[in-house]
Each structure stands twice: as C-alpha cells, then as structure tokens.
Image (cartoon, rainbow, N blue to C red):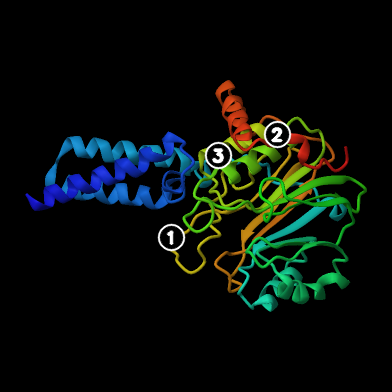
Amino acid sequence: MGMEIALTLLTALLVLTTVLPVWRHPHWLVRGWDFPRLQLAVFAVVLLVVNLCFFQAWGLFVLALACLCWHLWWILPYTRLWRCEVNFAKGDDVNRRLRVITANVLTPNRRADALIKQVHAFHADVLVTLESDAWWQSQLDTLVRDMPYTLKCPLDNLYGMHVYSRFALEETSVEFLIEDDVPSMHALLVLPCGERVRMHFLHPAPPSPTENPESAERDAELILVARSVEGSTQPLIVTGDLNDVAWSATTRLFRKISGLLDPRVGRGMFNTFHADYPFMRWPLDHIFHSHHFTLHKIQRLPSIGSDHFALYTELYLEPMASQKHNGLQPEPEDETWAQEIIQEKQVNVHDVPKPGK
C-alpha cells in the first residue's frame, strides 16, 4: 500500500510540473519548469516502467504516458529524429563563411586561456562573451591583433558583454533595452565578400529567486528583438545566453515572431548549461539566423572552467535565399501574446537598433 501511495504522489508531482508551464504565469516557480523537460521525460519513463512491472494502476499509467508524450513533443525537434530546419551548406567560398563562438565565461572563472585556445583552434571570426568583466577584458584583449573590431561592456554584475571580430563591425551600439544594468549589443558585420550581416547579442536576466522573480524582463527583451527583426530582408543573426531553453514556449514564440531559424532543430540539443552536472543540462546558449544562411557545423565545445560550455557555429551565407519556409509560422494568438509581453513592460520596438537600415 505504501508503494502505491508513493507512486500516486510521484505521478501527481509529474503532472503538476508538466502542467504548470502551460499556465504561462511569469513567476520563476512556473517558468522554471520549462527547463527540465528532458529530465521530466526520463522521470515519466521510470514511473511507467515501475507501474507496469509492479502495480498496473492504469489511471496513473495513462497520466504518466500523457506527460511523457507532452514533453517529447517539445524535445524531439532537438534530436536527429526530426527534420533539419536549416539546410547543410554546400558552398565552399571562404569569403561567405562566418564562424561564431558564443561563450558565457562565468565572471569568477579564471580560465581565459582555455577560451582563447578555442578561439584560435576553431579560427573563430566572431567571439561573443557573456558575464565578462574588466579582468576578462584584459585577458581577451590579446585577441585584438587577429580580431581588431570590438564591442566592450565590462560589468561586475554577471551581465558584462564583449564582442571580438575579425571582420569589420559598423553601426555598433550597446543598449539597455529593458533593465538599466543588463546590456545588449548590436552591429552590422561586413563579410569579406562585401555582404553585411545584422547582428544582435543578448543576455537577458533569468527568472529565478536570486535574479528576477518573474520572466517578464527576459521575455520582453526576446520579443522586443523578435519584433524588430520581423520581416527584415537582411542577413541576420541573434546569439547569446538567452536564459531560456530551446524548447520553451517563449523561445518558440521568439522564433515565430522573428522568423529566424534554429540550426539545432534536427541535429541535437547542444546542452550548454550546467557544465558541472551532466544529469541537469539544458540548452541555454543560442544562435538563430535568417534564411540567408546554411550550416557547415554546430558544436558544443569542451569545458573552459565556466558553468556553461561554449557554442561554436559555422554558417555559410548563400548567394540566394533558399530556406524561407523551413521555420515556424506565427498564429493570431502568438501575435496577441507577443503584444501582451511587450505592453506589460511598456517598451517600444523602435528602441532596438536596426543596423543597416
């Protein structure tokens, strides 16, 4: 009897944590359950096996199975079982290639040498760092010889940002779109072929008991940028630590509104956080791009001592756009939700720079 009660309570817990994010309430206790969908799916499988082998409590079995199916619906696009959203690159013109490393370095981490080695090993064209302060800037400035174009915003509050680039950066700006101490960076990158790429580098604050109690600020920044790039005909990239998982409803909303593509779809999860706990990892570091690009490679890099792994992405700018219909399409309710998110924080889409316009 005691085991049956335990199974009932555990199934009830699974149902509760599965249903909570559907509520869309911005509190971290609700939004936080978007993150461990993979872990909850494994938990559901364990409950199903235990139930089937020892209890045959079919009502509980059906509940656990429904939860498993729901989590798989969100997770499966980030496995090889799904159709790739971004086509594999066939071109080999090095002047149209762009190699990006996105790295949350963890401010107190002192393994700058490890990250610099990765930049050299992968011949990165662009390095964007999150949580980088003045000490990190002093270390990363050794890259300036090869990557002379920079954007710098060293901060001691875990929201410093830096960009180092081999290619020219034009119309650069550092903005504080939602919160006065959380920056974002914006630029127009000039490829060797002469084509210009609009780039946005983001690191919104997460919903958590130690940061923001609600996800409203994070969600507003993501949707604000999504609105600003919506309908753009420019080659465009958004990257950074978005403090939101690839399979959340808000990231999905960002993709729908922006029209940008996710190169991970059909290829893998590329879980970048937490580097120290393999059983508690999810994809927090992202790169999204317009249909102008195809993909040579995307890879999670080895540890640099941070709680995040760096993400390496090698994109190829196609001479002709060929992926216009591969992404997600917004529904009327998505437009309504996006407008509600922006209105709640009383921000204006025109506050987001539009380099190249």
Vertical position of residue 244 compared to residue 140: above or below: above
Tag 2–tag 1 contact (CB < 8 Å): no
Q: Quadrant of residue 228?
A: top right
Give the position of the C terminus as an image quadrant: top right
Residue shown at 73% from the left, 35% from the top: 349
**Distance in Å between CA atoms under marks 2 and 1:** 32 Å
Q: Nearer the viewer, mark 1 or mark 3?
A: 3
Judge by depth and name the residue closer to the eye, 238 or 315. Answer: 238
Vertical position of residue 158 compared to residue 220: above or below: below
Mark 3 residue crowding within 10 angstroms, few (<14) / some (14–19) / many (20+): many
Residue shown at 62% from the left, 40% from the top: 220
* Chain-order first, disc 1 or disc 3: 3
* Chain-order first, disc 3 or disc 2: 2
Res. 116 in view: no
Residue shown at 49% from the left, 54% from the top: 208
Taking the image as shown, residue 88 lies to the left or right of residue 167, namely: left
Q: From the image, tell me which residue sits under label 3.
A: 250
Res. 150 in view: yes
Taking the image as shown, residue 81 lies to the left or right of residue 86, namely: left
* Chain-order first, disc 2 or disc 1: 2
Q: From the image, tell me which residue sits under label 2.
A: 227
Mark 1 residue crowding within 10 angstroms, few (<14) / some (14–19) / many (20+): some
Q: Position of residue 24 (x, y in %)?
A: 47, 36
- Say the numbered circle drawn on residue 280: 1
Local secondary structure at mark 3: helix
